[in-house]
Image (tube, rainbow, N blue to C red):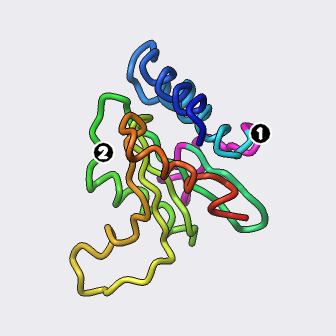
Amino acid sequence: MDSTMVSSIRNNFNNLPSSIEENVKIHVVIETLDMLGYSKVMLDFEHPIYHNKGRVDIAINIHDKNWLYVEVKRGDYDLTDDDIIQLANYINTKGIEWGILTNGKNYILFNNNIEIEKSDSLALFNKIVFSIDVFNDKDIEYLKYFSREAIFE
């Protein structure tokens, strides 16, 4: 991830008209996904999860049955354990391997195929591959692992 892309992500976040979820999705997340190799034409919005009782904010069909689910929250919202559980439920329901949870500033990459001990109460959180803050210079090098190339190619 070069410094121009990082600056663009940070500027998009800092220049949001407001921090509501739709603004974060449109002005920050879609642009970030595009920079990470997920073409905008691949994005399916408000994708139904099961019997129209739940919709993931962005579903990306990579090829065949390989999908990436992206759940977006408000920009001024701190991501919580409940949000991780929500994303996990979405990807479990459809048998999806990869998911991203974000508020435009923080990005959590989740892999559903990581083996865990059922008895571990924190087992779900062991499926988190990376958790980064795009405003933290030490974290930004890990953003490349969220890319289409790193995950699917």
- Judge from the rendering whether residue 28 lies leftward or rightward of residue 74; answer left or right: right
The spot of residue 38 in percent (x, y) is 70, 45
Residue flagged by tag 2: what amino acid is it? Leu
Return the mark for residue 79: 2
Question: At x 73% / y 58%, what residue is drawn?
Answer: 62
Residue flagged by tag 1: what amino acid is it? Val
Task: Categorize mark 1 by other alpha carbons within 10 Å: few (<14), some (14-19), many (20+).
Answer: few
Choose between 75 and 22: the one closer to the eye: 75
Q: Is residue 115 above or below residue 77?
A: below
The single residue placed furthest to the left in the displayed view is 121
Q: Quadrant of the C terminus?
A: bottom right
* Residue 25 colored in magenta in the image: no
Q: Quadrant of the N terminus?
A: top right
- Judge from the rendering whether residue 43 lies leftward or rightward of residue 78; answer left or right: right
Choose between 142 and 15: the one closer to the eye: 142
Choose between 41 and 151: the one closer to the eye: 151
